[in-house]
Amino acid sequence: MVTRWGMTVPLGGVALTEHAAVYEALSAAGFTDFWSSEVNGTDAFTPLTLASIWQPQARLGTAIAPVFTRGPALLAMTAAALAEAAPGRFQLGIGASSPVVAGDWNAAEFTKPFARSRDMLRFLKAALAGEVIDETYETFRVRRFRLERPPAVPPQILLAALRPGMLKLAATEADGVILNWLAATDVAQVLNEAKTGKPDFDIVARIFVCPTEDREYARTVGRRLIAAYLTVPAYLEFHRWLGREPVLGQLREAWATGDRRAALAAIPDEVVDELIVHGSPQECRAHVARYAEAGVTVPVMALLPTPELQEDATALGRIITGLGR
């Protein structure tokens, strides 16, 4: 049985200054882990820094900190600071992210994502262990760098991975893998490529959860997310590999022509229901548990907006309780 139960933070519509109560409610409901993402909302580390103080027993993780948007030394310093604030409780999840996040928004050149991820993983493992790094990697050069404050307990480093190459890299060189945008029924295929004998190798999965019994609303939200993500080349290739090309081919073709309405209509209900967890909070909890049964060690929910949350300010507490263990 899974012993860890995660939530993506911060929650939408709640100010960071009000998250002390959110973290308390999540902990009371049985959530052991708070995980942050980094796209265009908050950075990945500030919400976790607050959580490290407000909930000193909670596990913390980034899913993910992109490898292109910070230089190697800055990423190491940022991770070391949080590891010092939460010794033994923080896991650093890194990944390539996307051309939009890296290039369009952060003025970085999104080239050789596999090599950059591998190089950053190797650099961070050495840097966070307190080593002096003077090395030329394939994608960057670091000269005589050593952390002034290496953490007493270096954080585990997890790698976001989709397809076989990155999954195998995670299994051989990282302390865990971070999965995203997959159904519970996809977990076995993915983990077949991430075989490892490491006993403490964590398998983290970010799972989009829309806790409402308004099925039409949930599917509408889900279709928009699926269209936005599964037309990105990396996710498109991932789902081709998973075998969804026959189902999502029409989505890709309509999106390429700019026909957004046809693209959304091309996504079958069954695909939405596989990739977006929805229903009552209790039904959602049971669906997320299926990921754990398939081999995920840290299922991490990403809470989507619902009519209930928009209409009733008190609904959040009830939903958190229903989603908890």
Image: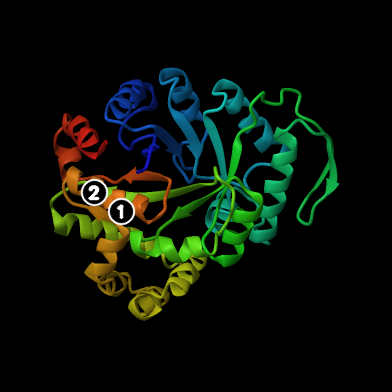
Mark 2 touches mark 1? (CB < 8 Å):
yes
Mark 1 lies on a secondary structure that is helix
Give the image location of residue 198, x and y in percent. 59, 48
Relative to the observer, which residue lies in front, 127 or 20? Answer: 127
Mark 1, Cα crowd under 10 Å, few <14 / some 14-19 / many 20+, is: some
In the image, 296 versus 111, the foreground residue is: 296
Q: In this view, does 118 lie to the left or right of 63?
A: right
Q: According to the image, label 1 marks what residue?
A: 290
Picture coordinates of residue 125, whole percent (x, y): 70, 40
Q: In which quarter of the image is residue 260?
A: bottom left
Could you say whether the residue bearing mark 2 is in a helix, strand or loop?
Answer: helix
Closest to the observer, 292 or 42: 292
Mark 2 surroundings within 10 Å by alpha-carbon count, few (fewer than 14), some (14 through 19), many (20 or more) = some
Establish if 235 lies above or below 43: below
The kind of residue tagged 2 is Ala
Residue under label 2, please give it. Answer: 286
Instruction: Using the image, tell me which numbered label, if any, was put on residue 173.
Output: none
Type of the residue with mark 1? Arg
Q: Nearer the viewer, residue 291 or 280?
A: 291
Q: Can residue 229 be seen in this view?
A: no
Residue depicted at 52% across the width and 28% down the height? 89
